Structure formats: structure tokens, C-alpha cells
Amino acid sequence: MIWRNLVKIFFCICLGVSISETLLSADQPSSISINWYKPEVYISNKPGYSRVKLSGQTEPSSELKISTNKIPFIDKDGNPQILPSEGVMKSEATYSDERGQFELNLELPMASVQLPIEVISPGGQSKRYQLYLEVTKDAYLKNQKNITNSPYSRRKWGVWGGFGINDLKYEQKSADTSTSLSYESFSGPTLYGKIARSINKEFSVQITANRAPGEVKSSTSTQVSQGTYYWSFLTGELTYFHKNWKINHQKKISEFGVQLGTQYHMVPFLMRASTSDPSIYSVEENDVFLATIGGTWILHYNRYWYFETFMRYQIPYLSGSLYDVSYKFAFDGSAGIIYRLKTNWRLGAFWYGQWHEYNFSHHKDKYFEANGGGGPYIGGEQSLFFSNIEARIGYEFD
């Protein structure tokens, strides 16, 4: 028992070495340094283990590797153990890129782990670090006060803006007026804005605003007295990322989330504009409020590029004064690719679309109101297929 306790004390002393402390050989220059980021944890297929991504910044083109064949750790029962270093990393070494950024993808037991890391500069100089990692369903570098989140992980705040072009295919039918109207509008620029806040690793909230112009032109059968419009909509949303829905596979990280929110739309609507001529129309905008529920997928292809997509069902629950709306189906979705230009700046290219199918009723028709012969309240069907391509720029920070 005395010998076992002495071994435990020895391991505890070893494990207490902090990240800022190094074991230097005589030829190791002090100029080699690393800025470590907070570790990130993912689900492991191996029971009792976690996949840990340890990242940071050092000199470009430096080699990083585990410096010994054995890794000491203390298990959940307080017993000292030894883990062979083979298999902890999928490759023997990794290299920092042209910005000096690096990632160590590790398969580690849920325990207190002492991880020996060696850094070798492009000139062949080396330096060793002893890292004290507390690995559970999360991971911590102990006794460190100034470690920050990786600038290439999700930041606390994000502010985005963008512009693009849109295409709208519109159809409107009414048996009450014996009309079937349709048009297609291709116009720009569309405007986009977003403010996002990550509350913690699992919850984030965001507010987005979109404004898309369009124009309806007269045809042989229909005259349009006022054809310009803006389809504007505002979205407030909560996203939940469960920790078990974050997967690290072949150095590509996938995050899955559930989204809940509400939207306010100013939807274009064709209505008769004359009391004397039933073929004259104008485009007006009607308020529609929708509840949204859907899912999102974010694929981090590498530390600089990631892909983002979502799809949401939209359920109208309140409409404005032009008509009452009843739900047939409606959804929106988006797909985009984003490049982390610098520590805080992001560039992205996105497609966004939505498809709305409504029944409308209780619309007061101006021509019927003035001349009789029907209504004056009419109903019908409305279909809108909206597609938009945008360039966006974002600034993200903690």
C-alpha cells in the first residue's frame, strides 16, 4: 500500500505540471512558443474515451508529435495507468500551416492525462511541453487562466451583411373572380443582415433581416398600375446543438442542431386596383407571421472552410388586413460555403429559398365592392417560389 501511494503521489506531481511549463534540452531555444486554445471534445466510438481536438498557434511549418511511447494518466478510481501513445493520434505527427495554426486530434481516456508534446521548428530546433488534460465529456487544460477559444471555432458574437439577386415565381388563383394570375420577377439587389449570439456550447440565438425587391409588369390581359414591391422578412430564432450531435470524422467536424423561431413577412399580393376596370391590378404587401421549426447542419471541412445548411417548416399563425391566410405548406432553406479569411473576418456565398402555398380568404375586392356582382370578399390560392443568391461578409468575436 505504501508503494502504491508513492506511485500515486509521483503521478499527481507529474500531472500537476501546467501547460506553460516545459522540459527543455540543452539545444532547445526559448524562442519556440505556442499559444494554446481551449480543447474541443467530440463523441468517440470507443467506450470510456473522448475525441479531443487540441489546437493552437506556433511557428509556421512546425512539426508537432507525442514525444514518448507511453502516456501516464489517472483513471476515475484514482489509480495510475499507462496508455501506449500509438493510436492516440491517427498519424505520427502533424504540421502547423502557413498561418502557424495546428490541430492535434486525439483519442484519450476520460481521465487525468499527462500528454508530452514535442514541437520541432522548420530549422530543426525542438521544445517539449507537458500538458495536463482533464478529460471527461468535456476537456480542460488545468491551471491555465489565459487560454482562449480558437478563433476558428464558434465565436460568441457574429455580425453579418450581404447582398445578391433574387427570382420569384408567383401564382394566384381565385374562383370568385375567375382569374388565374402569374408572373416571374428577377431583380436585385437583395439585402441581408444578421446578428448572432452563442450563449454557450449548446444554445445560440440569432436575428436575421432580408429585403428582396421585385417588379410585376403588365401583360396582354392584365394591366399593372403599381408593380414594384419589396418582400421583406425578419426572423428571430433559437438553435440547440446537443453535445452528442457533434461528430469528428476523418478530421471533418459535423454539428447538427434544432431550430425554433418566428418570422414576420411582408408578402407581395396582386389585387384589383380599379373600381371601373377589372383588369387593372397593383401589387400590395400583406403582413404574415409564421412559426418556424427545422434543423441545421454545419460541416467544418477544415479550419478555414465550412459548409452551412438549414431547412425549416413555416406555419402561418397571423395575417394582416388584406386577407386571412390558411396553411397548405411552406418552408425555407439555405446552403452556403464560408471561408475564415482572418481571425475574425468571414466571407461566404449562399443560396436561400422559400416555397409558400396558401389559401387566402376575406379579401375585399375593390371592383366587386363598387359594382356588385360578387363578394365583395373573395378567396383563392397563392403560390410563391423564391430563390436568392448572395455574397456575405461577417465579423465574429468573443
Image (cartoon, helix red, strand yellow):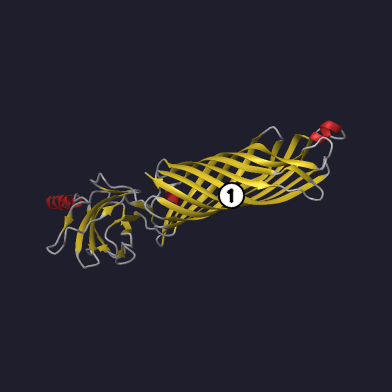
Judged from the image, the secondary structure of the residue bearing numbered disc 1 is: strand
Query: How many marks on residues?
Result: 1
Q: Position of residue 145 (x, y in %)?
A: 25, 44
Per the image, the residue denoted by label 1 is 189
In this picture, residue 283 sits left or right of residue 53: right
Q: Position of residue 212 (x, y in %)?
A: 61, 46
Q: Residue at x 21, y 57 (%)?
A: 129
In this picture, residue 141 sits left or right of residue 154: left
Q: Position of residue 329 (x, y in %)?
A: 67, 45
In this picture, residue 339 sits left or right of residue 40: right
Which amino acid type corresponds to the residue marked 1 in the rendered image? Pro
* Up/down of 86 relative to 242, above or below: below
Where the C terminus falls, by quadrant? top left
* Up/down of 225 relative to 119, above or below: above
Say which quarter of the image contains residue 128: bottom left
Q: Residue at x 66, y 43 (%)?
A: 229
Q: Position of residue 187 (x, y in %)?
A: 63, 51
- 351 and 284: which one is in front? 284
- 131 and 99: which one is in front? 99
> Going by the picture, which residue comes out furthest to the front?
225
Q: Residues within 10 Å of mark 1 (few under 14, many from 20)?
A: some
